[in-house]
Image: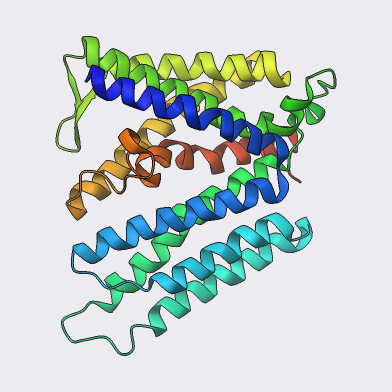
Amino acid sequence: MLAKFLKKTVVAVITIPILFVLLYLGGWWLLLPVMGVALVGMDEYYTATRRKGHRPSPMLGYVTGIMILGVTHFSPPELREGTLLAFIILLVGGALALQFGNRPDQSAVNNSAITAFGVIYVPLMLSFIIRLRQIDLPLVLGHTEALEFWHRAGAVLFVMVPVWCCDTVAMAVGGAWGRHKLAPTISPAKTVEGSVAGFVAAIIGGLAVGVWGVGMPWYHALILGAFEGVVGQLGDLGKSVLKRDIGVKDFGTLFGAHGGVLDRLDSMMSCLPPVYLYLWLFFGAGR
């Protein structure tokens, strides 16, 4: 467990500074890596499902995913939601149409659903990184004296930092002191002790970013940190359910000891949309 933790720490030390630079720069510097990560994540998912015997339509997924990310980045706000809805409708129709020539032993329902789910689960979720990057959260909150970095990356980091804190502390505490299994039939390595510690760490991370970084009222920061401490862990367990059903240990190897895109970003992807909606609902961000 210690060796695995150290390997993951090394990967994080290398990747986090690069991510900070990309978030600061924004624009194409962020869009292209997000597109690349989305393509890798969809490929991991579709490849795993094909090993299970399913036959999704990866190319339709790739094209739709890239279009969703492009529309999110470039489309005017008043046109974005309608355009994205149109792509989702075309995705569903296209996924089903591509099953017209299916073999008798193949399930059109399974294959079309797997194709559509791959797009919703990966690029649609990741598109909220772009949405959040377009929000100047300190400005929205009236915290104009915040550093430029927080103006540019604060909204995205409000998701990433609590999730990172939760994942890291949960693994460390669970590995050192965990005795009670959290969900033994889904993810045997996770413990109640690690989960509780991760939840507390997510709250601390949310308070740090919210109060110190972007100038959010402490109670909103606490609520969001606690929310991410729960939803992030549920997203991790959801990914474990998928892996157990498909029969793989990890979806990929892009991040070394961290596994693939879906192994590393599962918690964050689960938190991106609801945090964006919270900021939109309570602060009018992104409107």
Q: Nearer the viewer, residue 72 or 29?
A: 29
* Residue at x 52%, y 63% (from the top left corner): 65
Q: Image quarter for residue 259?
A: top left
Q: Is residue 39 above or below residue 60?
A: above
- The image position of residue 26, as x and y in percent, is 70, 42
Horizontally, residue 187 falls left or right of residue 204, namely: left
Q: Image quarter for residue 178?
A: top left
Q: Is residue 48 visible?
A: yes
Horizontally, residue 203 falls left or right of residue 43, namely: right
Q: Is residue 81 above or below residue 211?
A: below
- The image position of residue 163, as x and y in percent, is 47, 28
- The image position of residue 260, as x and y in percent, is 35, 44
Q: How many marks?
A: 0
* Residue at x 26%, y 50% (from the top left corner): 242
Q: Nearer the viewer, residue 188 or 13?
A: 13
* Residue at x 35%, y 27% (from the top left corner): 8
* Quarter of the image where the N terminus is located: top left
Q: Nearer the viewer, residue 55 or 185?
A: 55
- The image position of residue 57, as x and y in percent, is 37, 74
Q: Is residue 196 above or below residue 23?
A: above
* Residue at x 53%, y 76% (from the top left corner): 90
Q: Is residue 217 visible?
A: no
